[in-house]
Amino acid sequence: MIIADVIQGSPEWLALKAGVPSASNFDKIVTTKGVRSKSAENYLYQLAGERITGIREEGFQSQAMVKGIETEEEAVKLYELIRDIETEKVGVCYPNEEKSCLASPDRLIKGKSEGLLELKCPLIHTHVKYLLDNDKMKTEYWQQVQGQMYVTGLPWCDLMSYFPGLKPLVLRVDRDEVFIKALEKELGIFCKELEAVILKIK
C-alpha cells in the first residue's frame, strides 16, 4: 500500500482522485455478485473526461451528506472509545506504484490488529433501518468496503453507522477473497478501456 499524505476534501485530494477509479465508486464498475455493473460505461466516460481536464466532477451533496461530514469526528471518538484503540487519518491509498485505482478510507487502524474504519452518518430513518437489518448496510457498501481492503491489502474493515442519540452499529467485515478476485479482474478490464477511451478523445 502507498499512502499520499493529503487532507481529504482538499484541492490536492480532489486532484489526485480526478480520473482514477475509487473504492467509493467501485459499485459503478462491479455488482455485489462480482460481475460488471450497468453503470460502468457512464463512470468510464466520466473518468476519461476528468483525466484529460484534470478536473474532478463534483457529485451531488445532500443535506444528509453534509451533516454526516460534520458528525464524523464525533463518530470516530465514540468508535475509539468502544474499541479502546486509536485511529489514523489518511488521504489517498494506492495498491501499488501503478496507481491505477485508489481508496480514501475514513481511518486506518494500527496496533495488534490492523484494519480499516468506514463511517456512515445517515439520516435517522436509515440508521434505524440498519439497526434492524445489519445485512442492509453490508450490502449497500459491500463494493466500497471490499474495495478498500483490496487497495490497502488489509484483512478487515469495521463499518460503522452513527446517529447522535441512538446506539451505534459497528459491523466487522472480513476480506472476501472470491469477490476481491472478481473485482480485480473487472477493474483490470475497466482500466484498459479507460486508457483506450482517453487515447481516442485526446
Image: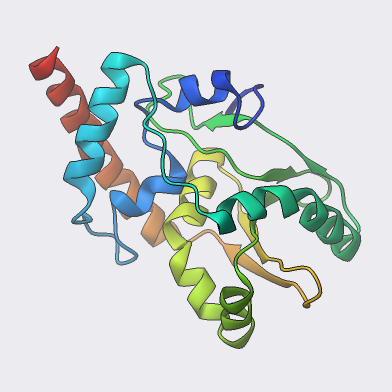
Name the image quarter holding the N terminus.
Answer: top right
- Residue 42 to residue 81: above or below: above
Q: Residue furthest left?
A: 200
- Residue 41 to residue 101: above or below: below
For residue 202, side relative to residue 28 (left or right): left
Task: Please state the horizontal and vertical placement of residue 138, each as a whole percent of the image.
Answer: 51, 70
Q: Residue at x 47, y 20 (%)?
A: 15
Task: Please state the horizontal and vertical placement of residue 39, each as a whole percent of the image.
Answer: 22, 52
Name the colour scheme: rainbow
- Residue 20 to residue 132: above or below: above
Name the image quarter holding the C terminus.
Answer: top left
For residue 103, side relative to residue 43 (left or right): right
Q: Residue at x 36, y 35 (%)?
A: 21
Nearer the observer, 192 or 22:
22
- Residue 126 to residue 31: above or below: below
Q: Residue at x 85, y 60 (%)?
A: 78
One can see residue 1 in this view: no
Task: Please state the horizontal and vertical placement of residue 100, each as a whole percent of the image.
Answer: 37, 27
Task: Please state the horizontal and vertical placement of residue 111, each as a whole percent of the image.
Answer: 83, 46
Q: Residue at x 55, y 42 (%)?
A: 153
